[in-house]
Amino acid sequence: VSQLKPGQLAAQQSTGKTSTVDICGVSIGGDSAVTLICGPCSVESREQILSIARLVKDSGARILRGGAFKPRTSPYSFQGLREDGLRFLAEARNETGLPVITEVMDARELPIVERYADCLQIGARNMQNFTLLKEVGKSHLPVLLKRGFSATIDEFILSAEYILSEGNTNVLLCERGIRTFEPSTRYTLDLSAVPILKSKTHLPVIVDPSHGVGVREIVPQMSLAAVAAGADAVMLEVHNSPEDARSDGEQALFPETLAKLVPRLRAVANAIGRDL
Amino acid sequence: VSQLKPGQLAAQQSTGKTSTVDICGVSIGGDSAVTLICGPCSVESREQILSIARLVKDSGARILRGGAFKPRTSPYSFQGLREDGLRFLAEARNETGLPVITEVMDARELPIVERYADCLQIGARNMQNFTLLKEVGKSHLPVLLKRGFSATIDEFILSAEYILSEGNTNVLLCERGIRTFEPSTRYTLDLSAVPILKSKTHLPVIVDPSHGVGVREIVPQMSLAAVAAGADAVMLEVHNSPEDARSDGEQALFPETLAKLVPRLRAVANAIGRDL
Amino acid sequence: VSQLKPGQLAAQQSTGKTSTVDICGVSIGGDSAVTLICGPCSVESREQILSIARLVKDSGARILRGGAFKPRTSPYSFQGLREDGLRFLAEARNETGLPVITEVMDARELPIVERYADCLQIGARNMQNFTLLKEVGKSHLPVLLKRGFSATIDEFILSAEYILSEGNTNVLLCERGIRTFEPSTRYTLDLSAVPILKSKTHLPVIVDPSHGVGVREIVPQMSLAAVAAGADAVMLEVHNSPEDARSDGEQALFPETLAKLVPRLRAVANAIGRDL
Amino acid sequence: VSQLKPGQLAAQQSTGKTSTVDICGVSIGGDSAVTLICGPCSVESREQILSIARLVKDSGARILRGGAFKPRTSPYSFQGLREDGLRFLAEARNETGLPVITEVMDARELPIVERYADCLQIGARNMQNFTLLKEVGKSHLPVLLKRGFSATIDEFILSAEYILSEGNTNVLLCERGIRTFEPSTRYTLDLSAVPILKSKTHLPVIVDPSHGVGVREIVPQMSLAAVAAGADAVMLEVHNSPEDARSDGEQALFPETLAKLVPRLRAVANAIGRDL
């Protein structure tokens, strides 16, 4: 391993093609279809996640997201339902057939998250938690790695390399906004990261416009732009009652907004020669 | 004027519609068509601009851009052909029928630029050159105002207000990238500025992906994303021989790339219900 | 001139010494003494500037600053007293003997500013107003050039080079804060710019902690730090009645704070082998 | 705990005084003395750390720093000597009497690090590794928490609150540079964080100019500035042979530079009424 060059496993292969990562039969990457991943920021109750999972399924999305272990800036904020949340997610998957992505925050929680999840998420704040990266590098599950909000693209690729170098080849890269001086949005969504990552690596690239801008009203436009920029998947926060959400409600789409957005995403995907 | 609230003239009107700015018969804004503006960074010779103007015309673009007065970081860099450059631009317009956008850097040069140009450009470095903003506010020509590369969106709108408050209602806002920590691109193109500007103002919004990313290879993807995000116009640098360009050659498209890109831009425009 | 390398005139000379710039008998630079420059953000009235000039003189500061032409983000904010303000400044100089630094915003205003000022200031927003830089490069007065709030140090040096290359050798570089993501302060004061500028150029370096942080309460600590970092001068905003200031009142020191600060600045200057 | 307001335990107490944290008899904080912490980036060998520890002791520094578990951007870079490194550090402490600060990267390594260290360090990349923060919050050892390089000051304080809310009251806050657009320095050292943190919390504040700027040549000036800004401690990287260092050699001071710097730091500390 020590003879490898930095980022060597992540580097673009000679074919120039994006690899495909399979999540329980749903594939991401491979240049043909764009995949839609939806769900709430946090799992808040059995009812909440089941109800949202159904509307996610109806919208045409292929994968369900939701957080059970929540990294929160303040120790006094809601920290997630933990194992209960994982159980409710699994129940939602069983009912809808949608594979489930959820975050793992610590190596010690990995076995329990692996028991319920179909894809592990590493959050932006943990992008350089190198011991955690090595652990998920040994997992049999695919890993969605979020870009740290002040990580350069090269640092992001090297964090993916931590996972790849442990033997896990199923890594998805997710742009979710970087920190800048602009206060109108929570972060600045760096869509140029999409073509840059695709030129430097063979890994599928996902965009999360919900966290990227943090403002519900402009998430649809940024989703369309993400597809046009070449994203292999778009991950959107949706909530049946955003005003009551226990975290990040101001960036979650209303169900009816999602329903109207999906055909527009498909139209843009078609315009650049892809499906959704 | 002193009773106006900040940004009042730029603010979104009750109709919620984007205004239309007319540049010699080509209109920008108004929510129906996306306009393509192309040309070299600098006018370098009569032959160069005539040759590029022809290929711009052939590509389907509607407006020609090119710099005669060039703001350069170093005093020892090429500073533009000045009045000669303006004359060559006017000749290119006469031959192709394309209206011409060119930068004015100083109030004292305004009369001469007005003599040749169809639309004045205020560059990013002059976005808060308030005396210049007031002067172009008195011009009969439309003004394309570029966002300073570290200006907040609210500061950008207030700079437009300087022009509007002098009586010139034909102002176009242009996002061209903001300065961040990311070194892979020259600037970070802030596409979220497009829907934010449209929610806060009635002014047409243009995106300049060439300056925004500074890397030719990803300009096509970012152009497509700009259209998907709702831009009213896209401004692209193109050069018949980018390797020989006297400024910013590394971000100029090859003519054949532009030719292939235009139908894809049109397809994305159509996908969101607009023409190009 | 075209054979000069970028930044050649600003570059550190073989002696490694900082040059000295003389402003009506007060010298800045030269490694021995630290100079204190104080005054209000804006000249607001004859009484105000005379009263502040007296307390500035009493504090031990050697130069008076104050704005007559004010660059303001909004066209509806107070824009300065213009020529009246210059006249009041000149009167304050005549009474106190303190040389006067004031901003020039536009080449057309330069003759009138030159008539009253002892040193010209180019504001941060005009750091890349290249036509203005060239004009002040022809002036007989010294020029205090402020760093643009998102200019790199190398760009800053090249803007100084615009002035130097027109023949004006009396250029002072002023760090005044850069734009970052941190909201606790108005800008982030980049004190590392002081030793970096001194290693790359022979020009005297000034720090403006008032604009740099924008929060009165921490200006004293940042002034002390600026002296410790090696600044040749510190420029401070002070106002006889900060709550009533027509611009930037929240960053102006109270007169009594200035009076207590000066001996502490002198103690730190002495600690690093300089006077004040 | 759930009734506490965000940051309540970290908040400035009614006395307005900085708390004192004791590290094996060396106290940091309390407004009287400034403490010097020195050592190499990484422990590289028994000889290296013993030799550096001796020169650190001779310089007048009171605490030894050195990394055994190293967070590295690339998985193929030197990752530290791990437990061997801890053992060598303990041996250096036993010989010199200097207490030892070293980083812990993961909750599972905490017991072993606690066995050897006198103060735990949480690195910038782990500032929002909330599970790790909770674990060190249960430790009997003091914790030096580094500011994430794109964390706001308020986020930094809330990360300290994670530790405090678990019962560990001995928390030290360390400013180590934030990420900005400026390429001359590795990060931009935000010295305004020192007085801001002191106004918002009662916790001692440390500055690490070595990581903050990443350029050996300007570390002395930034150290002096840190003391002048009010830092309770300064942490400096020093190496007996910086050119051969296995990590961050370009920012480590030469021993002779450290020896010359200490009396200057003491002079500035005295100038503001403190010892060193």
Image (cartoon, coloured by chain):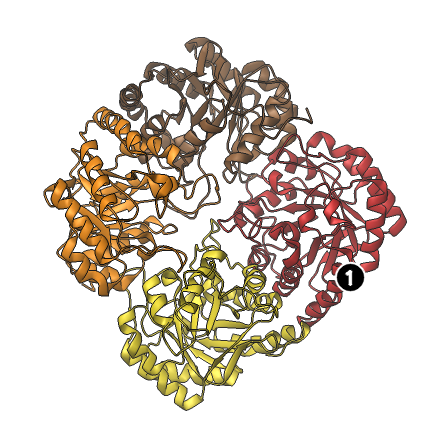
Chain colours: A yellow, B red, C brown, D orange
Q: Position of residue C162 (x, y in %)?
A: 61, 27
**Where is B152 relative to D59, above or below?**
below
Residue of label 1: B259
Instruction: Assess disc 1: are there few (<14), some (14-19) or many (≥20) residues with their C-alpha within 10 Å of its C-alpha.
Output: some
Q: Nearer the viewer, residue B266 or A110?
A: A110
**Where is D24 relative to A47, above or below?**
above
Q: Name the subunit of mark 1.
A: B
Q: Determine whether, in the image, residue D116 is placed left or right of residue A103.
A: left
Q: Quadrant of residue B88?
A: top right
Q: Quadrant of residue A224?
A: bottom right
Residue at image point 38% right, 81% down: A49
Q: Position of residue A99 (x, y in %)?
A: 44, 83
Q: Position of residue A221 (x, y in %)?
A: 57, 66
Q: Position of residue B218 (x, y in %)?
A: 63, 59
Q: Determine whether, in the image, residue B145 is placed left or right of residue C72.
A: right
**Where is A44 relative to B31, above or below?**
below
Q: Nearer the viewer, residue D131 or C64?
A: D131
In the orientation shown, which residue stands out farthest toward the left?
A: D25
**Where is D190 relative to A121, above or below?**
above
> Which quadrant is home to the C terminus of chain C?
top left
Regarding residue D177, the answer to whether it shows in the image is yes
Regarding residue D7, the answer to whether it shows in the image is no
Q: Nearer the viewer, residue A87 or B99?
A: A87
> Which quadrant is home to the N terminus of chain C?
top right
